[in-house]
Image (cartoon, coloured by chain):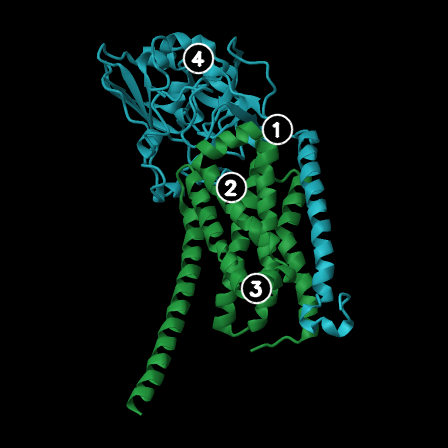
Amino acid sequence: MIHPCFRMLRYLKPVLFLACLAPLARLAWRGFHAQLGANPIEAITHGTGDWTLTFLLITLAVTPLRKLTRQYWLIKFRRMFGLFAFFYGCLHLMTYVWLDKFFDVHEMLKDIAKRRFITAGMTAFALMLPLALTSTQWSIRKLGGKRWQALHRLIYFSAAAGVIHYIWLVKADLKKPLEYGFVLGVLILYRIGAWLITRLSTRTKVEGVRDKVLTS
Amino acid sequence: MLIKKAEDIRSSEITPKSVYLNRRTFLAGAAVAGVAAATGLSLREMITPSAVAFAGNKIAGIQKSAFSTNEKITPYQDVTHYNNYYEFSTEKDGPAELAKNFRTRPWKVKIDGQVAKKQELGVDSIIKIAPPEERIYRHRCVEGWSIVVPWVGFSLSELIKRVNPTSKAKFIEFTTIMDLNQMPGQQRQVLQWPYVEGLRMDEAMHPLALLCFGMYGEDLPNQDGAPLRLVLPWKYGFKSIKAIVRIRFTEKQPLNSWNISAPNEYGFYANVNPNVDHPRWSQAKERRLGEFYKRPTLMFNGYDQVASLYSGMDLKKNF
């Protein structure tokens, strides 16, 4: 089991930060070299959408991965991954607001009301907003650990809304959205499983103590 | 005491320097990204298509057509690398790669149903039925993008007249080839295979309906529907069936694949109509490939000469 010391982690974070920017850099590079295909706006929309979902799932995978591999220091990067999900989500929203609707608010409101895949997408983004805004140490202190944790459970709903958004927008091929859905499902099942195990073990402990008390 | 002394601040509250610096980088990165995205797009438009890589045989004796539009033709590179051809792949850039070795000869087309004589015609004899014309048509996909393509072929009516349909023939059904070996996409039931499409007899007889075997002065590339396809410029692109192996004249309205897949989303007529939305997205606007701004979609894709085919029909019901 590697336990990186503080110095290693200091270098790892900027490296990971750049790695998280790589998808955007690649998109921009391909844009400059006319390698985004015949419909570059579509390529940018799909690319930023895919990476929003990917980073949401990476963020959700941190805790299961920490617990299973016992690399507890991974938690130091979870906030960064989450903020990158929000970052790519903002870019994805921009492709809609600017490149698709050209800032026509009236048209966008119509869309949100009528096109359910847009409703789902907007919901997924809206749910990320409070999480991004309360991502700082200051917020954790102000809200208190328990309230902060409860609020940040919204990420599950955001990811679910994102998968539903994807399912509702494809014409016929459900393969990719269902792949994302499957991974999300596994991550949720892990959390439910872990929670059940803690509940059951606490109960056995409590009952054990109660039995001892009653029979003594 | 109001002003905190150094010892009042817990060490855990001190933001690590790496995090503090990263926040600045994050914002800077966001700005760069915005600029990159913006300039990336404008550069794409400025880059004019370089020397075109033509693949097929040149077609001789192509005549000009009065049906051609003057609009700017979409670059060959785009039309051959942005394809909805689910028999090969559901990715737009998939068919160009996966259809490379698709065999288009020998190729027979079965003509049956309500015809005077059932027969099987080789594609090379079909191509000779009438002189080839270049028809520069607008092509509008149901997804909301459009292109302008210089197709080569002749009116479908020429073939229909040649095969003598009976008086019972009210519709025509077309079928695409079924070949699991050559078409990997057919191994998944993304759509029900083989792909089928249909037309009402008067639609098929309209001079605008094109039986197509070429584009840009050459044979059709595999990923664009070689060796034989339809082009129906006033309808959404999915009606323009590719790689035809069977033409059957029927009494009843035939099924068409996208209608089978989602009957509330894709109809039989599928006429381009900005007033009739797809249930999940609007059809009022479209993106012409190569352009930055979206343009308003035109009724019948701008081909008003077909309007008489639908007079009296409720196009919201018959979408």
Which residue is the site of mark 4? B208
Q: Position of residue B261 (x, y in %)?
A: 33, 34
Instruction: Mark yes or no: residue A37 visible.
Output: no
Q: Residues within 10 Å of mark 3 (few under 14, many from 20)?
A: few
In the picture of the structure, the residue carrying the numbered disc 3 is: A144
Label 1: how many Cα within 10 Å (few below 14, some 14–19, many 20+): many
Residue A199 shown left or right of residue B301 in the figure? left
In the image, are marks 4 and 2 on the same chain?
no
Question: Sequence order check: which comes first, mark 4 or mark 1?
Answer: 4
Q: Is residue A110 above or below residue B182?
A: above
* Chain at tag 3: A
Tell which tag, 1 or 3, sits nearer the viewer. Answer: 3
Query: Which of pointers 3 and 2 indicates the residue nearer the eye?
Result: 3
The quarter in which the N terminus of chain B is drawn is bottom right
Nearest the viewer among B317 and B224 is B317
Residue at the image position 58 percent from the left and 62 percent from the top:
A78
Q: CA distance from mark 4 to mark 2?
A: 42 Å
- The chain holding disc 4 is B
Disc 1 marks which residue?
Answer: B290
Q: CA distance from mark 3 to mark 2?
A: 28 Å
The colour one sees for chain A in the rendered image is: green
Q: How far apart are the alpha carbons under marks 1 and 3?
A: 52 Å
Q: Name the mark nearer the viewer: 1 or 2.
A: 2
Q: Colour of chain B?
A: cyan
- Can you identify the residue that label 2 sits on? A122
